[in-house]
Amino acid sequence: MAAPQKPAPAKSASKPSKGAKKGRWNLYEKAGDKLTRKNKTCPKCGSGTFMAKHANRSTCGACKYTIFETQSK
């Protein structure tokens, strides 16, 4: 007897909208003729590395430098 086969998982049919930004372009904001950075840059790595925003911290992906955000009550 053959073992029963499991059905293949359904593929997601959702596609990003045509106006959605992909990749690194969502880290910049255009104001007139200038581009400004949205995220902080890493103080250890320099201006070429962005820090990721999390709920309570900012983290560098290259060197793992972390800045914890303190909330005053």
Image (cartoon, rainbow, N blue to C red):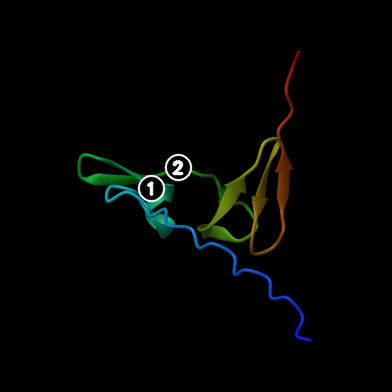
- Residue for badge 2: 38
In the picture, the quarter occupied by the N terminus is bottom right
Q: Which residue does the image show at 38% across and 55% down from the upper left?
A: 15
Residue for badge 1: 28
Give the amino acid at mark 2. Lys
Q: Quadrant of residue 5?
A: bottom right
Locate residue 49 relative to residue 37 in the image: left or right. Answer: right
Does residue 17 appear to the left or right of 33 in the view shown?
right
**Relative depth, front residue between 57 and 18:** 18
Looking at the rendered structure, the kind of residue marked 1 is Tyr
Looking at the image, which residue is at 20% across and 39% down? Answer: 32
Q: Position of residue 24 (x, y in %)?
A: 42, 57
* Crowd band around label 1 with a 10 angstrom C-alpha radius: few (<14), some (14–19), many (20+): few
Give the CA distance from mark 2 to mark 1. 6 Å
Q: Quadrant of residue 36?
A: top left
Q: Residues within 10 Å of mark 2 (few under 14, many from 20)?
A: few
Per the rendering, the mark at residue 15 is none
Tell me what residue is drawn at x 61 percent, y 61 percent.
45
**Up-down: is 12 above or below 38?**
below
Identity of the residue drawn at 37% across and 52% down: 16
Q: Determine whether the residue tagged by mark 2 lies in a helix, strand or loop.
A: loop
Q: Secondary structure at mark 1?
A: strand
Instruction: State whether residue 27 is above or below residue 2.
Output: above
Q: Position of residue 63 (x, y in %)?
A: 69, 63
Split into 4 quadrants, where in the image is the C terminus?
top right
Give the quadrant of residue 23. Answer: bottom left
Residue that sits furthest to the left in the current view: 33
User: Which one is nearer the viewer's eye here, 1 or 58?
Assistant: 1
Q: Residue 19 appears at what percent x and percent y?
A: 28, 47
The reply to whether the C-beta atoms of the residues labelled 2 and 1 are less than 8 Å apart is: yes
